[in-house]
Amino acid sequence: MSPTHEPFDELAACYALGALDGDDLTRFEAHLARGCTECEHALAQCREALVQPAVDLREVPPPRVKRALMERLARSRARRPRPARLGPGLKWVASVAVAAGLIASVVATYVSARYEQRLGEMAREASALREQISQQRQALALLRDPATRIITLAGLEPSPKAQGRMIWNERDGGILVAGGLPPAPQGKAYELWAVVGGKPIPAGLFGVDAEGRGSARVEPLAGGPEVAQFAVTLEPAGGVPAPTGPMYLASK
Ligand SMILES: [Zn+2]
């Protein structure tokens, strides 16, 4: 192995990982095109070492993986005493083995980080879907009941474009869906009120997403009294027993 060939050992390792780009890639491919048995062997060895961890690696590793690999190769080269007494062939085998081991460990770390992230995402998606299905089942059950009413809530002064629908059943409670509301400020939440006999009764708290949409399952009121009106006000996040803040939505 000639000293002038040394940079290509490192490039071969990165090339096998699919992590070469720009000048490095051009330089290495030109070198390969001229024919180099050392690099061909190195590539074959690296690819073999990569087969296992690379099976599920379907994306080109991002630049940080390449950086991490380059740094680790550089560190290990600096730490290792030069194996001066090994013949050229053995030195090459040792350097490829070290490079392949490092690549495998960098790739394994990258793969496991991606999988942990993906598993976390899947768990969150599954829980969100379960919540959606449960809400849709409740809505369907409510809609099958002839006693269920659908009540429209209109936007008031703070957000005239806001809208709400209440699917309401005096015996089973209901579901509120709202849209076009501004996100509640820090420490605040929207509170729903059911007006019975002229008196507002707290009926639950909800927030809205970045698009201003929110929904809430609303429990039936004790004794199942007939609700004359629904309204939504902005209140302290913990909720209050009687409305204090501005009214954003109200039914007729
Ligand atoms: Zn070469």
Image (cartoon, rainbow, N blue to C red):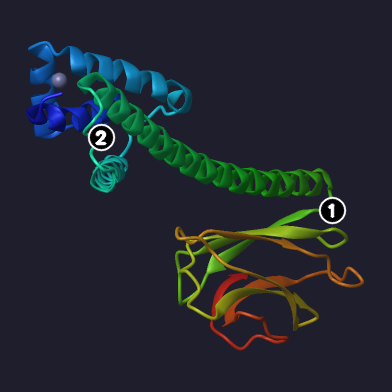
Tell me if 25 is positioned left or right of 108 in this view: left
Q: Quadrant of the C terminus?
A: bottom right
Q: State the separation of the CA atoms marked 1 and 2.
A: 87 Å
Of residue 156 and residue 182, the one placed in the foreground of this image is 182
- Report the image quarter containing ligand 1: top left
Of residue 104 and residue 248, the one placed in the foreground of this image is 104
Mark 2 lies on residue: 83
**Residue for point 89% across, 73% down:** 222
Q: Quadrant of residue 17?
A: top left
Residue 18 in view of the camera: no
* SS type, badge 1: loop
Above or below: residue 116 compared with residue 196: above
Q: Quadrant of the N terminus?
A: top left
Tell me if 11 is positioned left or right of 212 in this view: left
- Judged by depth in the image, the label closer to the viewer, 1 or 2, is 2
N-terminal of the pair, mark 1 or mark 2, is 2
Tell me if 88 is positioned left or right of 161 in this view: left
Residue type pointed to by label 1: Ala
Relative image position of residue 44 (x, y in whole percent): 31, 15
**Residue for point 35% across, 28% down:** 97
**Residue for point 68% across, 70% down:** 230
Residue 242 in view of the camera: yes
Residue type pointed to by label 2: Pro
Above or below: residue 230 compared with residue 5: below
Q: Quadrant of residue 73?
A: top left
Residue 147: give its label.
1
The 10 Å Cα crowd at callout 2, few under 14, some 14 to 19, many 20 or more, is few
Q: How many marks?
A: 2
Residue 102: give its label.
none
* SS type, badge 2: loop
